[in-house]
């Protein structure tokens, strides 16, 4: 039973296309995140949702739009893909109200390659 | 994607004291990173140490890496109340990142 799952694991696509990455968590957590791993391997927060509401929106292009149909899902839609969008994207979830406060559980990552 | 174990799970100290957190992992690594998370926020990158490095400093932070023991430690010197946060280690092996469960640090004024 995977706690945080992402699909697809690998995504290769042409510049200009629109694509979505899905994330699901079965931990009952209220908060979910999207991170982008940059060329230096650092993770940078992109978005955070709490109970389907956006609470963190860092400076990312408008082409990136998160969508949370329910608190167990946070999908990332990217319009008009550019070469520079190639990266690994990680989804995570946490439950600040739990005993292990703010422990983040990460998905396996989605490797996006834009050609 | 969890693989590391942080030790301790929770740490409470007085302002001015040093805080040491440990991370153990199971696989080979290219690098190991430490992150901080403030309440309600996402992760913030602190420091990266490569597999061929043994020690790295950044301000009040000191990170050590022992690949033979598959462990790393994060030392925060002269702690401040603002250092209160959760700290995570993450290992990177051939673009596969794995995270520990985190240490919750509380620094009392």
Image: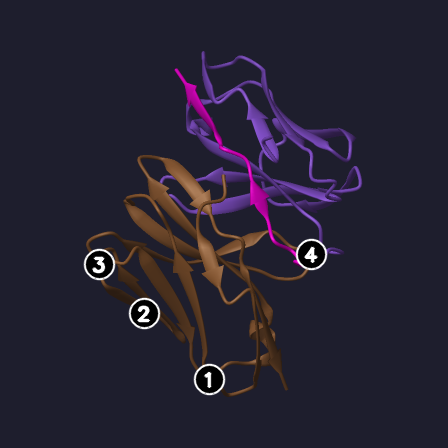
Looking at the rendered structure, the secondary structure element under dot 2 is strand
Q: Secondary structure at mark 4?
A: loop
Residue occupying image coordinates x 29% and y 45%: B29
| Chain letter, disc 1 residue | B
Q: Looking at the image, is mark 3 or mark 1 earlier in the sequence?
A: 3
Q: Decide if residue B24 is on the left or right side of residue B54.
A: right
Q: Are marks 2 and 4 on the same chain?
A: yes
Residue B71: give x, y in percent of width and height.
33, 59
Q: Which residue is mark 2?
A: B57
Query: Which residue corresponds to mark 4?
Result: B40
Query: From which residue to which does the magenta span run?
Result: A100-115
Q: Is residue A36 left or right of residue A56?
A: left
**Quadrant of image for the C terminus of chain A:** top left
Please name the residue shown 51% across and 88% down the image.
B16
Question: From mark 4 to mark 1, how far is it between C-alphas?
Answer: 25 Å
| Mark number, residue B78 | 1
Q: Which residue is mark 3?
A: B53
Percent x, y of residue A20: 60, 20
Chain of the residue displaying label 3 = B
Badge 3 element: loop
> Chain drawn purple, letter?
A
Q: Is residue A61 magenta?
A: no
How dense is the environment of label 4, judged by Cα within 10 Å: few (below 14), some, or many (20 and up)?
some
Q: Give the image quarter of residue A67.
A: top right
The answer as to whether the residues below labels 4 and 1 share one chain is yes
Nearest the viewer among B70 and B18 is B70
A34 up-or-down from A104: above or below: above
The disc, 4 or 1, on the residue closer to the chain's N-terminal end is 4
- Residue shown at the point (36%, 43%) measured from the top left: B92
The first of marks 2 and 4 along the sequence is: 4
Q: Is residue B1 above or below residue A5?
A: below
Q: Tell me if I can see residue B7 in this picture.
A: yes
């Amino acid at each position: 039973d995977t706690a945080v799952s992402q699909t697809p694991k690998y995504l290769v696509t042409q510049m200009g296309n629109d694509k979505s990455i899905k994330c699901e968590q079965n931990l009952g957590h209220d908060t979910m995140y999207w991170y982008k791993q940059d060329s230096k391997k650092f993770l940078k927060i992109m978005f955070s949702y709490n109970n389907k509401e956006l609470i963190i929106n860092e400076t990312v292009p408008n082409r990136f739009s998160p969508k949370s149909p329910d608190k167990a899902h946070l999908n990332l839609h990217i319009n008009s893909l550019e070469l520079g969008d190639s990266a690994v994207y990680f989804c995570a979830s946490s439950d600040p109200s739990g005993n292990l406060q703010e422990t983040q559980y990460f998905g396996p990552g989605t490797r996006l390659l834009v050609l | 994607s969890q693989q590391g174990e942080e030790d301790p799970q929770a740490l409470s100290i007085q302002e001015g004291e040093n805080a040491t957190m440990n991370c153990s992992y199971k696989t080979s690594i290219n690098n190991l990173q430490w992150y901080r998370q403030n309440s309600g926020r996402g992760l913030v990158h602190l420091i990266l140490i490569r597999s061929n490095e043994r020690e790295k400093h950044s301000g009040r932070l000191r990170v050590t890496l022992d690949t033979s023991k598959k462990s790393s430690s994060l030392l925060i010197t002269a702690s401040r109340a603002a250092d209160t946060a959760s700290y995570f280690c993450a290992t990177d092996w051939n673009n596969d990142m794995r995270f520990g469960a985190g240490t919750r640090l509380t620094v009392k004024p």
